[in-house]
């Protein structure tokens, strides 16, 4: 199913505490994350990871979810994730910022995402 007529075309996720529980050090997906990723992929949404974790690519590979994401950007380059978002938006050059949604366990990051 195509998402051409949808308001949101790209779903961007934080990694730690959003998709997996890094506090416990257990490498497993939180709750129903697998089902959510399946549903989004089936509906034609494009997805990305935007994390401060320098090991983001390794973690995503270990969790066996790399096939869901077109781009995985990890690393702490600034106080927020501006550099990371810039890399993601360059990848999705055919999509406007307003057609993206960001999920993060830290509410203030979600608010900041909309303000940038």
Image (cartoon, rainbow, N blue to C red):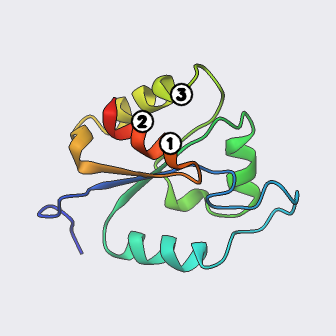
Please tell me whether mark 1 sits on a helix, a strand or a loop.
helix
Q: Which mark is residue 112?
A: 2
Label pair 1/2, CB-CB below 8 angstroms: yes
**In front of the other: 90 or 78:** 78
Q: For mark 2, does the 10 Å Cα neighbourhood hold few (<14), some (14 to 19), or many (20 or more) residues?
A: few
Q: Quadrant of residue 105?
A: bottom right
Could you say where residue 58 lies in the image, as x and y percent from the top left? 75, 46
Residue bearing the label numbered 3: 80
> Where 8 falls versus 35 (above or below)?
above
Residue drawn at x 26%, y 34% is 93
Give the left or right position of residue 25, taking residue 114 as reference.
right
Q: Earlier in the sequence, mark 3 or mark 2?
A: 3
Disc 2 on helix, strand or loop?
A: helix
- The reply to whether callout 3 and callout 2 are in contact (CB within 8 Å) is yes
Q: Which quadrant, please, contains the N terminus? A: bottom left
* Disc 1 target residue: 108
- Density class for disc 1 (Cα within 10 Å; few <14, some 14-19, many ≥20) is few
Q: Nearer the viewer, residue 36 or 116?
A: 116
Task: Please name which of the two marks, 3 or 1, marks the residue nearer to the observer.
Answer: 1
CA–CA distance in space, label 3 to label 1: 10 Å
Question: Residue 95 in the image: x percent, y percent?
Answer: 23, 42
Is 93 displayed left or right of 28 in the figure? left
């Amino acid at each position: 199913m195509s998402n051409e007529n949808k308001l949101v075309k790209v779903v961007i996720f934080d990694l730690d505490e959003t998709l997996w529980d890094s506090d416990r050090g257990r490498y497993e997906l939180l709750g129903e994350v697998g089902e959510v990723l399946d549903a989004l992929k089936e509906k034609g949404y494009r997805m990305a990871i935007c994390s401060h974790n320098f090991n983001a690519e390794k973690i995503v590979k270990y969790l066996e979810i790399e096939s869901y994401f077109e781009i995985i950007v990890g690393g702490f380059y600034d106080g927020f994730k501006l550099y990371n978002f810039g890399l993601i938006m360059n990848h999705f050059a055919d999509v406007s910022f307003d057609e993206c949604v960001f999920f993060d366990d830290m509410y203030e990051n979600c608010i900041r995402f909309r303000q940038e």
